Image (cartoon, helix red, strand yellow):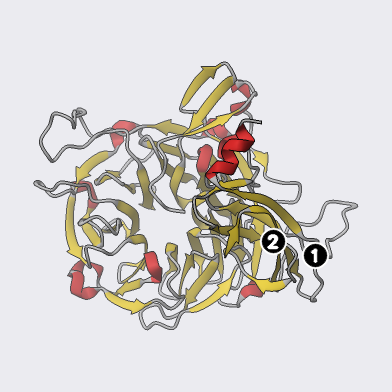
Amino acid sequence: MRRPLPRFTLIAVSCALALLAAPAAPAGANSNWTLRQLPPTSVEHTEAGTRYSWAPLSGVSCPTQSLCVAVGAEHTLAFSQAPTGGVARWHVVHPTAGPSKNCAEEEPPCYELGGRLQAVSCASEALCVAVTYEGFIYASTDPTGGAAAWSPTVVNEPHGTGATHLTAVSCPSPSLCVAVSGGSNNSYGGRVLTSTNPTAGQWQVARLGSSLDLRGVSCGTPSLCVAVAREGRIFVSTDPTAGASAWREIGTPGGPGDLEGVSCASTLLCAAGNLTGNILTSTDPAGGGWSEANAGGSVQITGVSCPTPSRCVAVDNNGDVVTSTDPTGGAASWRFENLVPFRPTAEQVGQPPRNALFAASCASTSLCALVGLNGRIFTATEPFSVPPDPPGRRARRRPRTIIVFAENFWGRSLTRHRRVRARFRFYSPTRTRGFECKRDRGRYRRCRSPLRYWVGHGRHALRVRAIGPTGLRGPAAIKLFRVLSPNRARRLATR
């Protein structure tokens, strides 16, 4: 999900560095998507082996078929003039904001470098703008010109005590860019920043609400912008540079679930994704009238891109991609595919999955790019076609279910109380009509992800099975776990 990203992610691997420069590889035997991974940002040698760390990529923009720009943690900016090529066709630079300051000794305002480039938007190959969670806005008229080609502007208040947490930016034309800020506990949240001359560093600030956590913005044209926020709130403006009064809240048409990614194709379609994997669409964004459909997943949609009103792609924080050639056609019009399977390891106990995808951008219907954790970049030249099954493979009839995450624990949980609240997320890589869950020795009952319920001390089993379009039940995915009191955990540890 589009939360503040970790500064780096450590993954234990045994492959040589030479493998990291290998050509791009297909994501799966019958997938349209090709993966390449950027070189690691650091290498650590330990007794357990060599560890590589990659900067998470949180934003991407492809203005044309021949340019894509991705951004992420550690001020990472990657660009390619051949986006579908191998990793060697992607170049990484680190824009700076001048001499670094020691924030332990300086008076505010003080800004440490090495932060997060959170999002990027390119109006054309001659203008790209990136924003950071530390209150910097970078603009470049030569995006492939290296680090020096990106000029920074600080938009934090001169005498403020915190940074403007910029979370998203959209540039519908070279003469308009719109950025938004988040952070519900930050007095600098809920801001909309606009510029008609972004390369000059001139930005106007409109405050929609200090407690408002804006997470995404998309301007289909200079006269239509849509911003989305936590708690499912949507704001629309037909005159984004006219100040706070020009932004109108249309409510929470998809309920209180957090909204992250949003994309508008001209004024004809806007699409946004929420906390439970649902896609909200509207053919009249300025007038309201949003509809909601489940795209096949059950976790936070983090990025959406609609190159035309009849084509949309979205990603979520479980490594899934969903595509549609009829975005307003309901759940049946979306195709679901998992690109990065969740494989829990001992290092990930109690931690969120490390397979998240955070952003998507489509230059056209024949080029889309996705980015996420561990420096992953996926591209597809036929993102909206249905690939044929490999020869000899029989179509799956029984829908599968995969349990991807248990909050607060994976196999074991400690509590000083008599019960603990368990929360599980699950999904099916095949089309379904819903799910059924069975808790311990109880009966199967209809359920949805995320599933939350109270459990006491002892061993437990959760079984989840998907229901296919024809009503056929698939095999159950089983998650065994245990809830211990502190005394019980100590007795087990001394055995």
Secondary structure found at label 1: loop
Q: Are marks 2 and 1 in contact (CB under 8 Å)?
A: yes
User: Where residue 428 is drawn, which disc sits there?
Assistant: 2
Q: Residues within 10 Å of mark 2 (few under 14, many from 20)?
A: many
Query: Is 456 left or right of 165, judged from the image as shown?
Result: right
How much space separates mark 2 and mark 1, taking CA atoms?
10 Å
Q: Earlier in the sequence, mark 2 or mark 1?
A: 2
Mark 1: amino acid: Gly
Residue 232 lies, in percent from the top left, at 41, 70
Q: Residue at x 60, y 56 (%)?
A: 321
Residue behind mark 1: 474
Instruction: Say if residue 9 shows up in the picture.
Output: yes
Residue 366 lies, in percent from the top left, at 59, 56
Q: Is 492 drawn above or below residue 4 in the view shown?
A: above
Q: Residues within 10 Å of mark 1 (few under 14, many from 20)?
A: many
Residue 299 lies, in percent from the top left, at 55, 60
Q: Residue at x 44, y 64 (%)?
A: 263
Query: Is 72 left or right of 52, judged from the image as shown?
Result: left
Query: Is 158 left or right of 334, judged from the image as shown?
Result: left
Front: mark 2 or 1: 1
Mark 2: amino acid: Ser
Q: Residue at x 30, y 35 (%)?
A: 149
User: Where residue 181 is drawn, which disc sits there?
Assistant: none
Residue 207 lies, in percent from the top left, at 19, 64
Residues 160 and 465: in front is: 465
Q: Is 238 drawn above or below residue 357 in the view shown?
A: below
Instruction: Say if residue 327 shows up in the picture.
Output: no
Number of numbered discs overlaid on the protein picture: 2
Secondary structure found at label 2: loop
Residues 176 and 78: in front is: 78
Q: Quadrant of the C terminus?
A: top right
